[in-house]
Image: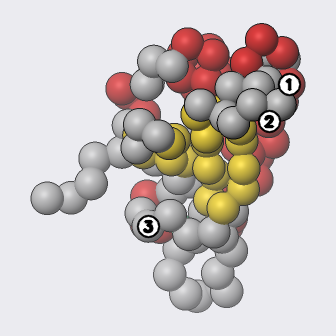
Amino acid sequence: MSRPERHFFVCENVRPEGGKPSCGQRHSGEVLRALSEGLARHREVWDQVAVSSSGCLGPCFDGPTVVVYPEGVWYAPVSAADVDELVREHLVHGRPVERLRYQWPE
Ligand code: FES
């Protein structure tokens, strides 16, 4: 097993009702599951890519949030319906999906 070249983190933070929004409340678990299933279908990158759950990644009001390292590409909001494209383009071929890229406020 070699060190992954690329790592996808999916925020699964859940905050109490009535508090600041959180990705877990917005079904980020479905995104993580779909991304993990997408990786499972691509054995050729199993030793190059990792998919992990994470706590809060920052843009809570705009999640579900995914960040990919080492390139530092942020995606938000991401739905399970977006994941096939993320898998095909970024996870397998290393090409960021511009339409999903999160724009941090200046
Ligand atoms: S709760 Fe997901 S980015 Fe903060």
The first of marks 3 and 2 along the sequence is 2
Pointer 3 residue Cβ closer than 8 Å to ligand 1 = yes
Q: Dots 3 and 1: beta carbons under 8 Å?
A: no
Where the C terminus falls, by quadrant? bottom left
Which residue lies under the disc numbered 1? 40
Pointer 2 residue Cβ closer than 8 Å to ligand 1 = no
Crowding near the residue tagged with mark 2, few <14, some 14–19, many ≥20 C-alpha atoms within 10 Å: some
Which residue lies under the disc numbered 2? 36
Pointer 1 residue Cβ closer than 8 Å to ligand 1 = no
Nearer-the-camera pick, 35 or 2: 2
Distance from Cα at disc 2 to Cα at disc 1: 6 Å
The first of marks 3 and 1 along the sequence is 1
Instruction: State the residue lying farthest toward the left.
Output: 106
What secondary structure is found at the residue carrying circle 2? helix
Distance from Cα at disc 3 to Cα at disc 1: 28 Å
What secondary structure is found at the residue carrying circle 3? loop
Determine whether 91 is above or below 3 in the image: above
Can residue 26 be spotted in the picture? Answer: no
Residue 29 lies, in percent from the top left, at 76, 53
Crowding near the residue tagged with mark 1, few <14, some 14–19, many ≥20 C-alpha atoms within 10 Å: few
Q: Dots 2 and 1: beta carbons under 8 Å?
A: yes
At 77% across and 11% down in the image, what residue appears? Answer: 44
Q: Dots 3 and 2: beta carbons under 8 Å?
A: no
Which residue lies under the disc numbered 3? 58
Where the N terminus falls, by quadrant? top right
At 44% across and 67% down in the image, what residue appears? Answer: 58
